[in-house]
Image (spheres, rainbow, N blue to C red):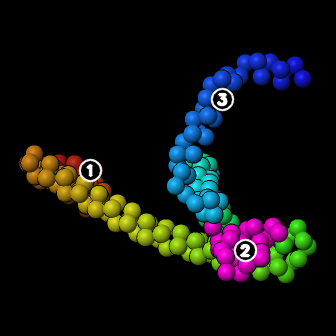
Amino acid sequence: MDWFKKLLQNLPLETISDWLGNIVVWWSHMVEGVPSAELPMYAYIGGSIIVLLLWLLVARLMPRPLGGISWVVLFAILFAPGTALGDSSLLAPASIGVVYAVMMKDIPGAIANALPILVVTVAGLFIGFIWQLLRGAIESSMEKTRQRAEQDTQAQIQLASGNYLAGSLDSSGPDIDESNLVKTKKK
């Protein structure tokens, strides 16, 4: 317990208090003109966007496909549309309906509320698959263009230096055995 007391003594509590005060002032200025009925929706959407942006930092540390898949799943959990419990005309996140149904031990209700999450996940994974195909095609095209430009540059350098035979003696040209050339010169 002494480590906790030392930690509290070493924390800059005044600085943390100032930061929190600035955040509260910033938030109050930001939501000044928002009606109180719409404030929870804005807070939920803003918080979800912040969570997704922070998850991008975590996803970049993960192996390539797992980071993107985890981001799509988190997006689906946060933003999949569902209905509010009392009123079917109001939209609410589907994850809230799943949690409520599980707490009430309503397994069919939990499955029904999980379907929008699964649909958004599948749609996001499909869009990610198409994006990766396009990205791969673009990268391979750019690599081919870069290789052609490099070959053109080498050809220009070769022409400028007057070394016209250097290109025919490389690995793509005919194989010349040096021992046969030496024997031919001796004859």
The residue under label 1 is which amino acid type? Answer: Glu
Name the residue that disc number 1 marks.
178
Q: Residue at x 81, y 75 (%)?
A: 110
Q: Earlier in the sequence, mark 3 or mark 2?
A: 3
Q: Quadrant of the N terminus?
A: top right
Figure label count: 3
Within 10 Å of the Cα at label 2, are there few (<14), some (14-19), or many (20+) other Cα atoms? some
Residue 46, can we see it? yes
Q: Residue at x 59, y 71 (%)?
A: 125
Which-is-in-front pick, marks 2 and 1? 2
Query: Where does the image place residue 48, in percent across and percent down from the top left?
Result: 62, 57
Q: Which residues are the magenta region?
A: 79-100
Q: Residue at x 14, y 48 (%)?
A: 157
Left or right, 120 with respect to 158, comes to right
Check if residue 75 falls in the magenta segment.
no
Within 10 Å of the Cα at label 1, are there few (<14), some (14-19), or many (20+) other Cα atoms? few
Mark 2 and 1 residues: CB-CB less than 8 Å, in contact? no
| 119 up-or-down from 93: above or below | below
Name the residue that disc number 3 marks.
17
Query: Where does the image place residue 61, in percent across and percent down from the top left?
Result: 60, 48
The residue under label 2 is which amino acid type? Answer: Ala
Mark 3 and 2 residues: CB-CB less than 8 Å, in contact? no
Q: Residue at x 88, y 67 (%)?
A: 103
Q: Earlier in the sequence, mark 2 or mark 1?
A: 2
